[in-house]
Amino acid sequence: MEEYGKILIIAMPVFLALIVIEKIYGIYKKNDTAPLIDSVSSISSGITNSVKDVLGLSVTFLSYEWLVSKIALQHLDANVLSYCIAFFVIDFYGYWSHRLAHQINFLWNKHAIHHSSEEFNLACALRQPIASLVNLFTFLLIPAALLGVPASVIAITLPIHLFLQFWYHTKHIKKMGFIEHILVTPSHHRVHHAINPEYLDKNHSQIFIFWDKLFGTFQEELDDVPPVFGITRPANTWNPIKINFQHLSLLIKDAWRAPKWKDKLTIWFKPTGWRPENFEEKYPVNKIENVFNFEKYGTQNSQKLIYWSVAQVLITLLFVSYLFDNIAKIGLPNIFIYGFFIFLTIYSYTELMDKSKYAVLWEGFRLGIVICIIGYYGDWFGLNRVIPNSNYIIFTYLVLSFLTTFYFVNFNFKTYQNQYINS
C-alpha cells in the first residue's frame, strides 16, 4: 500500500500537468475536447480508484506469488529479461481481461466507468473502477509464472503498464504511420471508446495492437465514420461512485424481476446488455439508438459551478496527497476513516455538479464527519505537526464548502435555470 501511494504521489502531478497542457492546446487550436466539468468527473473517478487500490480494498482469490511457488519450471532473477517477459505477459493478460469485461454482463459493471465519458481526452483515461473488488484473472499470468518471473517484477510492471495507457486517450493525435501496426495509438483507442455500431467492442489491446489482429477484434478508424463516445446506456451523472454501480443495479433489478429461474441465474453470464425477454418494453432504460442524434449530459452549467467544481477537485487532491504520503503514520484503522472521507467528499461535490438538491445534505454530513474526527483525535491525522493551525484551516474550508453548496442549490441553480429557459 505504502509503496504504491509513493508512486502515485509522483504520477498524479504528471497526469494533471498533461491534462492541463491538452486543455490549453485544445483552446489554442480552437478544438477544446476537454470540458472542465467532464474533466473534474474523470479526475474524481481516478481519485476513487487510486484510494481504493492504496487501501487494498480488493481481493485476489489466486495470487501470482502462490502460482510461482507451485508451477514455476525455473526461477528468474529481477533483470531486464524478466521485466520484458512480465510486460509482454501482462499485456496478454490485459487484452483478455479487457475483452471479457466487454463481453460478459456482470464484468461490464467494473469497466463501464472507463467508457462513461461522452468526451475523449486525457482526463477520461483516469476513469477507473472502484467496483473491481475481486481479481478473477490472475490465471492469465500463468505463462510468466511458469517461466519463474518474480512476483516483485509483476508488482512493479503492472502500474507501469497501466500508466502507459494514459497517453493515447486524445483526439489531438491523428494516425501515426507505421506505429499503427505495432502499438495501440489514439486512433485505435478512439475506435475502442466509440459507440458507433461499426466500432463497438473492437480494439481491446492495451499496449501492443497485434492482440486484436491475432484474435479478430481489430477495427481501423474510418475516415467517413467519426467516433461518437460514451456508453449506449448513458450514465447521465457526473458522480463516479454512482456510475460504478449503475450496471450492477440494473442486473440486480432484472434478476429479481425475471419470472424464470433460468434467467435469474444466467443473466450475469450473458453477453453484455442482455436482458430477459420483453424487459426492454416492460422496464425500459434510456438507450442511445442514433449515435449522431442525442444530447450530451450536463452541457449547461453556470461558470460559477464549473470553477467551484475545479476548486473542489484540486483541494481533494491535496487531501489525497497527504494520505498517500503518510499511510504508515496515519496507520490502521485511521486510513480507512480517511478513505471514507475522500469518497464522501467526491460523492458530495459531484452530486452538486449534478444539480441535486441532496448535495446540501451530503455536504452537511461531510462537515459533521470532520467535526467528529477533529473532536475525537484533536487533529486532522497528524497534519498539525506539518501545518500549524491546520484544524482551523480545514474547518473553515468545510464551512465555506457547505455554505457555497447551500447557495448553489437554493439560489444559483434556480436563477441559471430561469435564464436558460428564457434565452
Image (cartoon, rainbow, N blue to C red):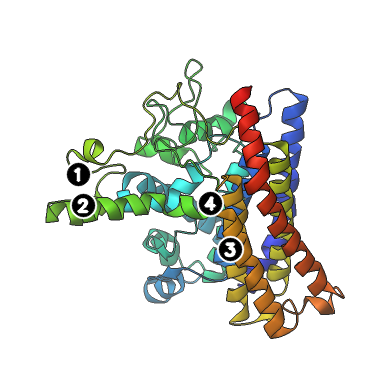
Q: CA distance from mark 2 to mark 1?
A: 9 Å
Q: Is the residue 352 above or below the residue 319 in the image?
A: above
Q: CA distance from mark 3 to mark 2?
A: 31 Å
Residue 344, numbered circle: 3
Residue 387 location in percent, x, y?
85, 73
Q: Which residue is mark 4?
A: 240
Quick one: label 4 or label 3, which is nearer the N terminus?
4
Mark 1 or mark 4, which is nearer the start of the sequence?
Answer: 4
Residue 127 location in percent, x, y? Answer: 55, 48
Which mark lies nearer to you, 3 or 1? 3
- Residue type at mark 4: give it: Pro
**Helix, strand or loop at mark 2:** helix
Assess disc 1: are there few (<14), some (14-19) or many (≥20) residues with their C-alpha within 10 Å of its C-alpha.
some
Q: Earlier in the sequence, mark 2 or mark 1?
A: 2
Residue 136 visible in the shown view: yes
Camera-nearest label, 2 or 1: 2
Q: Quadrant of the N terminus?
A: bottom right
Cα–Cα gap, marks 4 and 3: 12 Å
Mark 4 / mark 2, whichever is N-terminal: 4
> What is the secondary structure assignment of the residue under circle 3?
helix
Q: Amino acid at mark 2?
A: Arg
Label 2 sits on residue: 257
